[in-house]
Amino acid sequence: MKLNGLLLAPDASNFVVDALKNLEPSVKATTLKKFVDAVLERNLELDNISKAVCEEIFHEWKSESTNSQEFLFITDAFQVPRFKYCKYSRRFLPLQDFAEDARSLLPNSPAMKAFLYAHRYERVLRNPVFAASTKDSIAGTKANASGFKLQPIEFLLALGAREDNVVVLGALTQLKNGQWYLEDPTHLVKLDLSAATFHQGLFPEGTIVLAEGSYDDEVFKVTGIGLPPVEEPHLTRRYFSVPNPFGGSAVDGPAAAVDANMIRLLQTSQASSDMLVLLGETRLDMPGCIEHLETLFLGYSDFPPTAFVLCGNFIGPELAAYNSLTNKVSFLSLSKFAFLLVRVATPTVRRAA
């Protein structure tokens, strides 16, 4: 400092010494040089440097460090907490048993897979609209305040006559190739979709849907089919026994709504043109898939996203018996043009720095 004609006040000197005392000697020397440069850049009128100036410099460095901190994380699928719905407490509770936890991640029986759909169905059914409909149905009322009946499939199968204007909540399934059924926890019914109007959304097998139509002669003739209303995040969190059910940190960590990193991610995405590109049903074993991905990545080279997210299944069911080897070969093929990803990602890194 003296070589530059500067003099630290006693309290300022103590502050700097205390701030740098835990650094390695080489890092300490570099930091001191950076500190002197920061003081000289301020063009102070007095040569005597006060503690306030030192605090301001270190505060700016801390802010810069915070702003450059990563806030987009990748959570290993094996580290995501898994839960089981408890009908007594009406909450999703963390799985404590290791074997049960493993089975929930990689279901090895039809019973475990059925629980996945049952939990998904329960999530939709607890919507206040459907809850009211269920109570009306139990009480024998024809319709709820929304003007429709929500009937279990078991009720339809017990009818001996035609029933019109019926709305059923259930999961789409195929027991035979090309023949669709609707299933709920009580039973399943054959669907006639020839006159159905499909409302906005995608309807793959296993989707929980609302189907409207008439029932006659063991067939539910659908006139309209759509997705149920989406549950608000704050309502979903009420049914979990922990604040952070989605992984990335401890289950008792902060919820997404109050997590500083999540808030920064939201603010950054809203304040800039950055984006995430999500690719669903990525089949690396399909002919031409790798070439199409290469074209896609090159297409984003001028306006690179923050990240590409590729979702599986990455191979078809016909290769399930060889999934380990096939996945390895497919991802090796994908890595052959990894340099394209570097080309795309580099501008993103520079812009975020």
Image: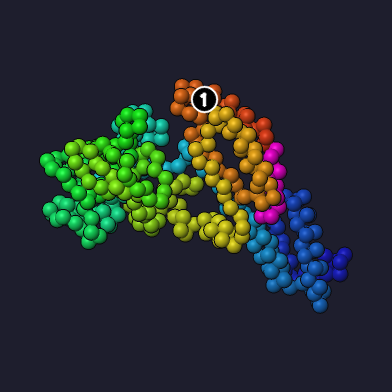
The number of discs equals: 1
User: Where 299 falls versus 218 (above or below)?
Assistant: below
Q: Residues within 10 Å of mark 1 (few under 14, many from 20)?
A: few
Residue 140 falls left or right of residue 180: left
Q: Circle 1 is placed at which residue position?
A: 324
Residue 106 visible to the viewer: yes
Magenta span of residues = 339-352
Res. 155 image quadrant: top left
Give left or right: position of 65 versus 148.
right
Residue 264 seen: no
Verify whether residue 1 appears in magenta.
no
If the image is split into quadrants, where does the C terminus sit? bottom right
Residue 87 image offset from top left, x and y in percent: 25, 45
Main SS, magenta region, reads: helix
Give the amino acid at mark 1. Ser
Tell me if residue 344 is in the magenta stretch.
Answer: yes
Residue sitting at x 46%, y 22%: 321
Hey, which quadrant is residue 192 in on the image? top left
From the viewer's side, name the closer residue of 115 and 260. Answer: 115
Give the image location of residue 4, x and y in percent. Answer: 86, 66
Residue found at the far front of this picture: 195
Q: Toward the viewer: 87 or 6?
A: 87
x 52%, y 56%: residue: 262
- Give the percent coordinates (x, y) of residue 250: 46, 47
Which residue shows up at 23% across the image and 55% down it?
148
Q: Residue at x 83, y 69 (%)?
A: 6
